[in-house]
Amino acid sequence: MSETSSAREREVDVVVIGGGSTGENVADRAHRGGLGEVVVVEDELVGGECSYWACMPSKALLRPTAALEAARRVPGAQAAVTGEVDVEAVLARRTSFTSDWDDASQVEWVEGAGLELVRGRARLDGERRVVVTTSDGGTTTLTARHAVVVAVGSTPVTPPIDGLDGVRHWSSREATSSRSVPPRLLVLGGGVVGSELATAYRRLGSEVSLVAGSAVLSPMEPRAGELVGDALREMGVEVVVGSRAQSVERDGDEGEVCLTLDDGRVLVGDELLVATGRKPQTGDLGLETVGLEPGDALDIDAAGQVRGASGQWLYAAGDVTGLAPLTHMGKYAARAVGDVVAARARGEAAEEPAAWTKHATTALHRAVTQVVFTDPEVASVGMTSQQARDAGLDVRVVELDLAVAGSALHADGYTGWACMVVDESRRVVVGMTFVGQDVAELCQSAAIAVAGEVPLERLWHAVPPYPTISEVWLRLLEAYGF
């Protein structure tokens, strides 16, 4: 690990700005590809948002109560559930997954992988140059022989609501790292973060009100959002759809918070979680020094190279591109970018990689995988039916209730739904959505069907084992006409 205390300049092979999971993967792949001097610059915790404030702690908050609910849905097991959730134990387990917000083990991994870590705030300073300012005011200027890769992620969007700027409130960071459960929680935003954390905190004992704007999980298939919204209401969450927040007030820094809606209703809570989306974190990155606009998403080609910057040296991966802002998709793009940077340094990689080849990030556009860990879960791959229509495809949609032998065995009263979007001109699946308990594990089979562009005639021969929830594939294909 390198700490700087005065100005100095160095030349290295690759500079990766951002030490989250995306940046780590870029750096590792570039180094494995033969580039010896790969520097990762990070000004917060190495490991990034997913490790400390997003994927891991949020799922750790959700899992214990999901396990309890699953047991309660199976007679026999149900009788063994005689107590309530141990909130302190849940919070302690959550904290264990974040290593108590200590990145020592992640730093050890970076160094063990043969990479160098520089702590500090990085800004571009012209072609191939990165200036890093450390906490003590010192600077290091790193000049990259081969590439600079931007992997700084995203930052929460604060909506223009009267009074919000002056009111203490939670972002997803505060919500996933809280040391206690508030008696009343207001959630502004019905997307993935809002829906998951409304689920988690309701089941940990909070009275929760969720303001979802136009719909719950609006970017997904409408039926998926409807089922999740119904489930939230059933567990006691007040779900408000069709109204928007107009103003926010708080009685001091610790008093109750009042959220006034545009229909005149006033919601009162002890904490307010604002989960209204995120934007690429490019406002203070020095993009203007390379001819790009600060604050914008970085527009990349199929290999992750940033368009608009002269020369073949600036790359980006992850949330900063505005494409598929999901940890696993960022890591997927990172592997491609790290590989192509190393290959181009060896003079081997093509200028523009073909779709679905090693150095291409095709799945960012055609096979994005996502799971929403509400109850029921939502698993999706590729396009929604509306996105497919908007893309001009000859679309046929097959949808049905997820009611097969496997789901019946899984839980009494199992509620689920499946939707298959087919491009009729090629007779391949371009989108899948599953809703139901434990459907997350169906996501990979759908990803193979979509990314592999498996013809329906061949997919028919992929026989699902009985009795599993995956039998829904058979039912969908039968409904299609096989």
Image (cartoon, grey):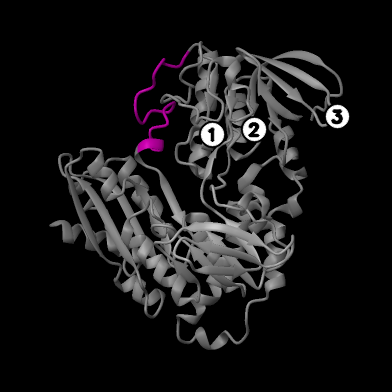
Q: CA distance from mark 3 to mark 1?
A: 27 Å
> Is the C-beta separation of discs 3 and 1 under 8 Å?
no
Please say if 235 is above or below 435. Answer: below
> Is the C-beta separation of discs 2 and 1 under 8 Å?
yes
Q: Quadrant of the C terminus?
A: bottom left
> Which comes sooner in the sequence, label 2 or label 1?
2
**SS class, disc 1:** helix
> Which comes sooner in the sequence, label 3 or label 1?
3
In the rendered image, residue 353 lying in the magenta stretch gets the answer yes
**SS class, disc 3:** loop
Rate crowding at label 2 as few (under 14), some (14 to 19) or many (20 or more) other CA atoms within 10 Å.
many
Given residues 18 and 110, the one toward you in this image is: 18
Name the amino acid type tagged 1.
Val
- Per the rendered image, the range of residues in magenta is 348-365
Q: Which mark is residue 18?
A: 2
Name the amino acid type tagged 2.
Gly
Determine whether, in the image, residue 221 is placed left or right of residue 20: left
